[in-house]
Image (cartoon, rainbow, N blue to C red):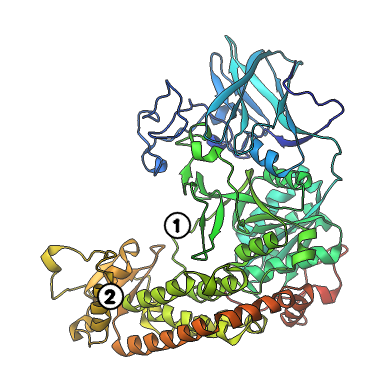
Amino acid sequence: MSTTLVELPGATWRTVHRVVLPLDPDADDLALYVDHDSAVSTPGASGGRPGDDAGSLGGATATESGPSAFAVRHEGRSENVRGRRGLVVDARSRVSFGTYFNAFPASYWRRWTTASAVRLRVELAAPGTVTVYKSNARGLRQRVTSSTVQPGRPLVADLSLATFGDGGWYWFDVAAGSEETALVSAEWQVAEEVPPPASTLSIAITTFNRPDYCLALLRALAGAEDVRAVLDHVYVMDQGTQLVADEPGFAEVAAALGDQLRVVRQGNLGGSGGFSRGMRETLREGRSDHVLLLDDDIVVEPEGVLRALQFAQACRTPTVVGGHMFDMFDRSVMHSFGERIDRYRFFWGSVPGVQERHDLSAQNLRSTPWMHKRVDVDYNGWWMCLVPVAVIREVGLSLPVFIKWDDAEYGLRAAEAGFPTVSLPGAAVWHVSWIDKDDGTDWQAYFHERNRLVAALLHSPYPRGGRIFRESVFTDVKHLISMQYSTEVLRLMALQDVLSGPEHLLATLPTRTAEVRAARKEFVDARASTDVDAFPAPHQRKPPRKGKEPSSPNRYTLLPWAAAVVARHLTAPDPEALARPEKRVAAMDSTWWRLAHYDSAVVSTADGTAAAWYKRDPRAFRDLLRRSAAAHRQLWARWDELATAYREAMPRFTSPQAWDEVFDASTVPGAAAVPQPDAPAAGDVARVSAGEER
């Protein structure tokens, strides 16, 4: 049965988005594929329709600011799933494929590709009704067409993309009559006057001492036949000491992948070094049109890999195509939907209007208005990111920064060269979220500070980086009054390296992590213990004022409050507090304005596994505050000079030739490579060396 809503004589139709069901129907992510619930609006949601139940999700209320916290989850019916493409629809019931993985993101195809129309093809096993819907950028639902579909006579609906300038999706529902029906298959095809040439990809996976995660990812890729059909190589950059090749089951996975697998052993050069090596090997091989960067500790939806490649093929200009990130341990929760760089603060974060940690099992796509507006991004995290080889040839490899800001800076650099980044709905992975991490205070604090400053020197459009200078000073003071002296030492190391000029990036890449860790261990606030009885019981000799815990100063009281706190931290602490902590503070409560009032406190780590005893030290406070002021005075005075130096040097230290020298230096002679058919020459495969965490 054919429904023609747009005329495109002579067009060629190419399948770019197949309707799929989860690999594991019993997992907690069924709601991302099929929706058995009604679409409801949240209170105050824009675009609500008259008659919508505006206050309830299964009897619970939800708000735009926090739907995940209050809504009731809906688990679906996993027993109705029939493989990857089929679903039973019970008699007198209705299911919707207006879901994250199966609705068609029409506005993204309209904005970035040459496609002008999309064709929906739906095949049912028994009579049923297929109703096609679309939405606009405000999330308003509009019925497009509805047809009764008979077995052997699939619905074919040709649909225009013309109205999707700012947002909107297409999707369809299936309803059964007095007897059950079943979806056999469904797919979305785009109309192209000139089909793009066939493209292939290589996959680059960077891993460090996560052999179990990495092997599971390789196993998933080995079993994805459709991905294998467009795959040239999987490069595994193993930078650890617990090797993937030594993991039980590796031999079977390696045999299944055959000559598509390449294991590269090299010293630990961080995420930037691992992914740069994957880019470099892809360039060296010269076969692939794209390289897909994947983190090691993810679960991948293989269909999303195909969608990213097919979208990239259709883009008007070479485009970096990223995937979204769901929470691996809360699988229906969207952790990252769109990232941008605030150019004035020069800090990353979600695109305005995007809600973080949105639970699609509690509030489905059809009732989430903000998810219908097209989200344009500055970059995509390298948990899943498809980079055209043409972009790599033009802008180079990653900055040699180990971790942090490598993906964000690359997106900015690509955009400045005319290559956009798109975070594509329907292409995603599940990754361990950073909600229970605070890597701004551990050894990674060095990389947060240095790499943010380097990226700002390279790309900030504002004099002296806009607000970044002021925020850097404030952050130093916050760490000092929080008794986090180890963190401040690392931030000062970062400042000094930035001031030394761009050549330090390549020179220190293999060694800086170990040096950072060693410097941090000199301070008690970095010595965490997992033993709950490792510290004396807390005792606070002076009770809180009026029985209330310290509160945050406001804009009017901040300056006098800060002056009083700094003055206090220059005086000697209570000797009793140095022998016995005044307070035990949970990680979520360890704010700078609370810790500033204690002489000592036992503070939990963000993941809850350990705690450290913070102690006030006036000598360290005075010395570090003086050094911070001196370093920031230099940064202020030399900003323009440094910006020029870093921008002029960037093409050198992101070039394949510069990275080759780093890769060669990380080689350990004599370590055996994993045998591979048609493997690169011995000089091209680096060996393992000891390293730190990626």
Q: Measured from the top left, where is residue 103 in percent x and y?
A: 62, 33
Left or right: 582 in relation to 143? left
Q: Judging from the image, what secondary structure is the residue with disc 1 in?
A: loop
For image coordinates 57% across by 24% down, the residue present is 142
Q: Nearer the viewer, mark 1 or mark 2?
A: 2
Instruction: Tell me the residue at 81%/66% (across/down).
Output: 675
* Mark 1: amino acid: Ile
> Which residue position is annotated with label 2?
562
- Name which quarter of the figure residue 404 lies in: bottom right
Look at label 2 and name its amino acid. Ala
Labels 1 & 2 near each other (Cβ < 8 A): no
- The quarter holding residue 26 reads top right
Element marked by disc 2? helix
Q: Is residue 234 above or below residue 479?
A: above
Residue at the spot 80% in from the left edge and 59% down from the top edge: 390
**For residue 70, above or below residue 201:** above
Up-down relation of residue 70 to residue 418 (above or below):
above
Image quarter where the C terminus lies is: bottom right
Mark number, residue 435: 1
Q: CA distance from mark 1 to mark 2?
A: 29 Å
Q: Return the residue nearer the eye: 493 or 249.
A: 493
Q: Residues within 10 Å of mark 1 (few under 14, many from 20)?
A: few
Q: Is residue 649 visible?
A: yes
Q: Nearer the viewer, residue 479 or 94?
A: 479
